[in-house]
Amino acid sequence: MNIATHPFDALMDITARPPTVFVRGEGSFLWDDSGKRYLDFMQGWAVNCLGHSPPVVVDALAAQARLLLTPSPAFYNAPSLKLAKALVDQSCFDQVFFTNSGAEANEGAIKLARRYGALHRDGAYEIITFEGGFHGRTLATMSASGKKAFEPLFEPKVSGFPKARLNDLESVKRLISDKTVGVMLEPIQGEAGVWPATDQFLRELRTLTREHGLLLIVDEIQTGMGRTGKLFHYEHAEIKPDIMTLGKGIGGGVPLAALLATEQASCFEHGDQGGTFNGNPLMCAAGLAVLQQVSAPDFLRSVVDTGLYLESELQRMSARHGLGEVRGKGLLLALDLKHPIAARVVAQAFDDGVLLNAPRPDALRFMPALNVTKAEITAMIDCLDAILTRMGAARRVA
Ligand SMILES: *Cc1c(COP(=O)(O)O)cnc(C)c1O
């Protein structure tokens, strides 16, 4: 690594990063500036759903860049109209607002729910969220998150987010009051370590929120766009939420996210919501290319198939090394290591040319490209297997 050509210290030091600069990506592989190749099972946190620099996204961006970058958020543009229509056609929602990040989409969902409360529920504004939940890093979305490490930070928080426990309907019921306007959750808690809400819990929540006239908001920023084998995770539970947010995979690697709502919940008035880059044609053109691929015939069937293969390979490896359960769905999976060795495993895998993620000290999370091949899965498993064998031997010696 040549520090002179890449001075690291001009960037704010907001997280620990390896002293490596990545310069190129293709499919499931990344290369650093020394020419070393890495097999990528993080894909920018489930962002590159078609892998690194997929030709369909590159071509869509290049074509759109030559045509029009941004006319002004005060005017319509064709890619945003097309993408909104395609998302509405393939979901239970009627209207879309595009944003530049997942946190901004969730911030919009919170504002929309508060607007709904002001209009229809006598000023109710509380949104019940969940312990362990993660909704982003703006002040309101950190407040909505149930991440322990966020609790002491940036006080005072935005108020109005009482926390229930995932898969515990009574804990939700206890929090409902005149002030409640909605319930918001990730169908699978990703950042917390891949903890799924059961389909039954999602259905019970839908019934409960209907009974009380509350909005059900699903944060599908990580689970949406085919990640769990359906285009949107809520389809597994056969429910129709009122509001959904998308992010990460929707842009296939570029900053795009979206807030979707049913006609009844879509109650913003002029002046409530907006933004300079929101729904710009360049990002929406990428989103259209991604959606066309992910909703092509057989694409989701192959995600299910590949997900089951990864799951069974992880289970077999877990059995070989005496590790814990495999959690998650489709191509969003976690392996419980039963010991706080995840950071060491991730560092060793990095040296060996495989990119993995540790959302917790004792778990690994796998979020490869949705078109990852079985051969690539086998290569990742072989690498991880060898690391665990070496570490297991080291543990026995120690
Ligand atoms: C990543 C994520 C967010 C935040 O998205 P950003 O684009 O990082 O702002 C919100 N909710 C969930 C479930 C996420 O996984």
Image (cartoon, helix red, strand yellow):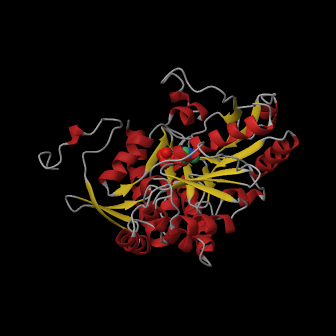
- The spot of residue 207 in percent (x, y) is 85, 46
Residue occupying the far bottom of the picture = 297
Residue 189: horizontal and vertical position, in percent?
Answer: 61, 44
114 lies left or right of 278: right
Residue 395, located in which quarter of the rendered image?
A: top left
234 vs 47, left or right, is right
| Residue 336 seen in the current view | no
Comparing 205 with 344, the one in front is 205
Relative side of 165 to 278, left or right: right
Residue 310 drawn above or below residue 293:
above
Choose top left, top right, bottom left or bottom right for residue 13. Answer: top left
Count of number-bearing discs = 0
Q: Position of residue 109 (x, y in %)?
A: 63, 44
Q: Quadrant of the C terminus?
A: top left
Where is 221 relative to 138, above or below?
Answer: below
Measured from the top left, where is residue 246 in percent x and y?
58, 54
x 49%, y 37%: residue: 137
**Res 268 visible:** yes
Report the front residue among 275 and 53.
275
Residue depicted at 18% across the width and 48% down the height: 6
